[in-house]
Image: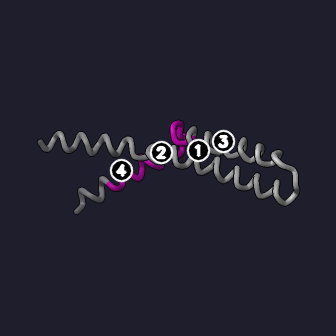
Amino acid sequence: MKNDAEKKTGTVKSVAPYLNLGFEFALAILIGLALGYFIDSRLSTRPVFLLIGLLLGAGAGFLTIYRAVYPQPSDRQKKIKRSNESKKQSFDR
């Protein structure tokens, strides 16, 4: 029984960093659209900046997903170091 609970906890921990990616992607697009709409309303250039904001927001969203799926080697090393430190602290207690 305890082994099953540990497996579920491990699975949740491995998936957790990716659960918010959809929200972050949608938010990046909405921010780009909002900024584009605002600039278009000020300059009366509809829909030029709206489309530019859409493209920039989508690009930012894809970049966020890319960075989450393919982290930089230095980011991986930092996560491993933090994980090892937290394990060491839990053993010290």
**Kind of residue at badge 3:** Ala
**Residue topped by disc 3:** 58
The residue at the point 30 percent across, 53 percent down is: 87
**Kind of residue at badge 4:** Asn
Estimate the spatial distance between the alpha carbons at disc 2 and disc 3, rounded to whole Å. Answer: 29 Å
Q: Considering only order in the chain, which callout, 3 or 1, is on the residue closer to the N terminus?
A: 3
Q: Indicate whether residue 15 is drawn in magenta.
A: no
Camera-side residue of 39 and 15: 39
Mark 1 in CB contact with mark 2 (< 8 angstroms): no
User: Where does the image place residue 48, in percent across and percent down from the top left?
Assistant: 83, 45
Q: Indicate whether residue 82 is drawn in magenta.
A: yes
- Mark 1 element type: helix
**Kind of residue at badge 2:** Gln
Estimate the spatial distance between the alpha carbons at disc 3 and disc 4, rounded to whole Å. Answer: 36 Å
**Residue topped by disc 1:** 64
User: Where does the image place residue 60, in percent across and percent down from the top left?
Assistant: 65, 45
Looking at the image, residue 11 lies above or below residue 90: above
**Kind of residue at badge 1:** Thr
Q: Which labelled disc corresponds to residue 84?
A: 4
| Span of residues in magenta | 67-86
Camera-side residue of 66 and 41: 41
Mark 3 is surrounded, within 10 Å at the Cα level, by few (under 14), some (14 to 19) or many (20 or more) other residues, namely many
Mark 1 is surrounded, within 10 Å at the Cα level, by few (under 14), some (14 to 19) or many (20 or more) other residues, namely some
